[in-house]
Amino acid sequence: MNKIPWDPSKRKRMADYHPNQRDEIRRKYLIWRPNQPDIDFPYREFGKKKNRRRFNADWYDDYAYCLEYNEKEHKAYCLCCYLFRDNIKDSHHGHDAFIVEGFNSWNKPKRSVTHVGNRNSFHNRALKDCEDLLKDQSISAAMHRKSEIEKNEHLIRLNAAIDVCRYLLHQGQPFRGHNESKDSKNKGNYRELMDYTIKQNDVVAKAFKNAPENNQLLSPTIQRDITECFAKEILSYVMEEIGNGAFSLLVDECRDVSNKEQMAVVLRYVDICALVQEKFVGVVHVEETTASYLKSCIDLLFSQLGLNIKQVRGQGYDGASNMSGEFNGLQAKIMSENNSAYYIHCFAHKLNLVVVAITKKIFDVGDFFDMVSVLLNVVGASCKRKDQLREHHQEEVRKAIVCGEISTRTGLNQELSFQRPDVESTKRELEKLRTNERWDSLMRKVYCFCEKHDIPVLDMEDAYVNPKKPRQKTSINNEHYYRVDCFFAVLDLLGEEFNDRFNEAKLLKLAKHYPDDFNHKDMVTLEHELGLYIDNILHDTRFSILEKIGDLAKLMVDTRKHLSYPLVYRLVKLALTLPVATATVERCFSAMKIVKNALRNKIGDDYLSHSLICFVEKGLLDEITNEVIVDRFHKMKDRRGKNEM
């Protein structure tokens, strides 16, 4: 509003402004008054005799309410007709000189009288519209005349609505009720909680009592708008933390309760405190699951968030072909645009594939898992058997806690992400299991378990009897069968699968290829900087007890070594940015089952995404102040009762 020009020559046509802004702009011009400069008006020659005439300043007095003079073009205009030219139809006067081209025929002063015309003329109708506008006869203008008390009451109601929405979003609860009428026994969570707030707070009760029916802030539209405000503020915070830095993309798909395929998107990055963050930025309804369609959805989401595909430094998906396909998968399409966006197969899925491979190759192991599956089906089919199993399990847990076998601690299943596995150490531990000491230790545990549960103990020196062919003699004893044919076979396959699926050479290769982050000059400097860095931390005792690379990054920031060795810190950040597992995305799908359940299965896609962002990132939700939401809420659209700050 402060940028609208006063000079008639620089004004846009009123029809070019947004319809919701036109009355406000017209009122602004009328308050400013017409542009009537007091200058030495230049002469202009007319006719063959070249009679000299110029603008007469006395005309300002005759038409003080509308006549304007343009110093640049030296022409006269009518302000009233300019303001309402497009509102008055069926009049050729809407295009005369006083409105469009400007009037400069100073030798014909009577033209101004012709322009004004009779009482039904274009000019007089425009003048009447100006007077009505200044009398505040529009709804919008009437709202601008609200007293400070009314504005404060509007703010009280809005803050109450924000508090109720914050609580329901934090808990993942639905807002609407089946019957929200005044006589309903259950109006839904939003209205019931608002009624409770009104009963408990006299100030809020008074504000709602004095509120007009069209400004109660109880409608579903208001609820969705406030939810969107919270979600946009959370996303704004995450985007501000990422800035122009690098991040990894974690994506997975899941079908919701209404059979819609939803794609959850999580961004992994290192914040200013050197802490790894994995933030949920929304779900996208995907009509197809092809790699091309998923890529287009991600591009659209990035454009909405203000992110660039060039910032991606890692991709984390499961092993589905449309995601991880080397040639036509989603990871390949992103890599074609950004060769630094390396794909990392989720380590949790890899470990699961190791177990699957072993069950397929060793029949006894497969039979064991089949037996467990049958047992689960038998127990799960009966409520009575499930209750008995649950009671027995609770008793076993209680005994284990008393004797110290297990400890109680919260948050064990809420890790941000798995620690990057040390594959070599794991393989060394598998090799140690082959020793006699480890085998004897395992057998002692087996004997103890059998005695505890009254299971007959096999004599390991007896001949092994094949349960499928009991009459057929074998040339081995029980110890040879269980140790060599079963235990060692499992260890061999575990080592083989670890070598195939957790190739350390590939991970090391990733750290050497970041052309967008390290140019040739940086690589030369990095080699020198690394030498200085290693020598420095070897003599710093604070770096002697670190366990994880995340601890190293945080300590570098705490000791300000990230400023002394910026390239080393950049490399550490890139290593931390690489994804490990998609556990965070899986937890988002668990949250979706809470937010979108069978009774809330018609929630819109945008509303679902906004609600999920608030529910998953509830830590950020709690940090947002009401003042920020009020400001964003008022800027979303022109509202009744908007507080003019």
Image (cartoon, rainbow, N blue to C red):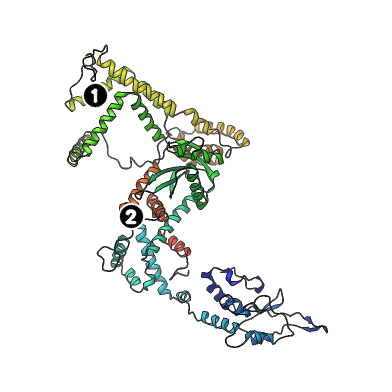
Task: Identify whether 503 is placed above or below 102.
Answer: above
**Image location (x, y in percent) of residue 591:** 35, 48
Q: Quadrant of the N terminus?
A: bottom right
Circle on res. 644: none
Viewer-nearest of discs 1 and 2: 2
Question: What residue is at 70 percent from the left and 75 percent from the top?
Answer: 71
Give the residue type at disc 1. Val
Other-residue count near label 1 (Cα within 10 Å), few / some / many at <14 / 14–19 / ≥20: few
Q: Residue furthest right?
A: 49
**Image location (x, y in percent) of residue 456:** 17, 22
Using the rendered image of the protein, determine whether residue 266 is visible from the camera's viewpoint: yes
**Image location (x, y in percent) of residue 333:** 52, 40
| Residue corresponding to mark 1 | 446
Q: Secondary structure at mark 1?
A: helix
Q: Residue furthest top?
A: 475
Foreground of the two, 530 or 637: 637
Give the residue type at disc 2. Arg
Question: What residue is at 68 percent from the left and 85 percent from the top?
Answer: 111
| Residue corresponding to mark 2 | 600
Q: In the shown orientation, is residue 326 left or right of residue 396?
A: right
Q: In the shown orientation, is residue 101 left or right of residue 561?
A: right
Task: Identify whether 205 is placed above or below 519.
Answer: below
Q: How many marks?
A: 2
**Image location (x, y in percent) of residue 163:** 36, 61
Q: Quadrant of residue 424?
A: top left
- Alpha carbons under labels 1 and 2: distance apart: 50 Å
Using the rendered image of the protein, determine whether residue 433 is visible from the camera's viewpoint: no
Q: Earlier in the sequence, mark 1 or mark 2?
A: 1
